[in-house]
Image: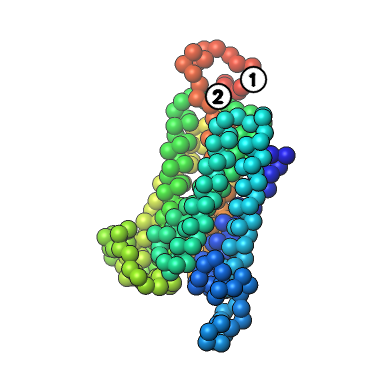
Amino acid sequence: MLRRLSFIALMMALVVVTLGALTRLLDAGLGCPDWPGCYGQLIPPQHHPETTTAIDSHKAWMEMTHRYIAGLLGLLILVLTFCVEKSNSVATHTRWLCRGILMLVIAQALFGMWTVTMQLLPQIVTLHLLGGMALLSLLLLLFLQLSKTTPVIVAPQGRKLSIIVLLFLITQITLGGWTSSHYAGLACPDFPTCHGKWLPALDLQQAFNLSDIQTTNYEGGILSSDARVTIHVVHRLFALLVVFSIMLLAVRLWGYTLLRKQLLVILFLTLIQVSLGISNVLLLLPLSLALLHNTGAALLLLSLIHLIFRLQPKPQSLWQQPHHNLEMDRVI
């Protein structure tokens, strides 16, 4: 039952992350300017309660749907944590993982509130996105720990490389969130150049000034054109590093036959992500492709974490010793 509950929570978290991206892409993050209600009500009203002015009900409902489903996910994780604590067959580290997930849910609720009350401050929006990705990742780890997963013994360098690739991918997701929160997705309307230039005018200082916090509405973005171009270009360039590192990891681990299907999935998702990124620029950021780009990043992250979970470093004493339960011999 625990395994099933963890899987349901994982799928629901993916839905919540996707709805969060949809809310952001529809500029519905401030569809309800207060929290946790909407204009002081549980259900979005048709008109402003004080001025009787019509409100954008579509954006309000989008925001509240995201909140309500996130709330249901929080309740499910609370139940899951309770069941894990009561179970006698769950390892101690799994219990602590579940407690950590519950704490992260609480933190995400706070980030969701601050996203609204601080009027889409990019630092908060990006942290909220990363929190969603972290929640997805931890729920996957919980599901894997409650499942029977066949480990694969690899050389220590292979696992180290996979962790480096994971760090690169997390950085790229962060840059993607920074690009989205600053509305810089179309700062470069062409590809592979930017405004017809290989090296456009950049403003690194303004683009990545984390201490710049203003009491203003950030919807639509407030940075200069050069700063947005800088964010967009850095996101593109770092994508090249991520793609190269993933290809290097695939080459490094291809000899382990039990890993080939996972490696193919990771390579396929990488190809899809690159294609979606380019298409988003050339097609002027259509909603469907932008949403798929966000979900694709989540799936790529989960696939890489699943791969790393299966990798077991080969102890020095096992280099010359066969093992019958775990695959350790590479195909030459």
Residue located 47% across and 36% down the image: 162
Which residue is outermost to the bottom? 52
Residue located 55% across and 24% down the image: 153
Q: Nearer the viewer, residue 3 or 104?
A: 104
In this view, 29 is above or below 305: below
Locate residue 18, reporting x and y percent: 58, 59
The quarter of the picture where residue 120 lies is bottom left
Is 139 situated left or right of 231 in this image? right
Locate residue 134, reporting x and y percent: 51, 47
Residue located 45% across and 47% down the image: 170
Q: Is residue 183 visible?
A: no
In this view, 141 is above or below 38: above
In this view, 12 is above or below 191: above
Find numbered disc 2 in the image and state the secondary structure of the residue it sits on: strand
Q: Is residue 99 visible?
A: yes
Which residue is outermost to the right? 1
Give the residue pinned by disc 1.
325
Residue type at numbered disc 1? Asn
The quarter of the picture where residue 4 lies is top right
Spatial CA distance of label 1 from label 2 is 10 Å
In this view, 230 is above or below 263: below
Q: Nearer the viewer, residue 172 or 221?
A: 221
Q: Nearer the viewer, residue 51 or 154?
A: 51
In the image, which disc is placed on residue 153? 2
Quadrant where the N terminus sits is top right
Q: Earlier in the sequence, mark 1 or mark 2?
A: 2
Q: Nearer the viewer, residue 155 or 104?
A: 104
In the image, which disc is placed on residue 62? none
Residue type at numbered disc 2? Ile
| Residue contact between numbered discs 1 and 2, judged by CB atoms under 8 Å | no
Is 182 situated left or right of 268 in this image? left
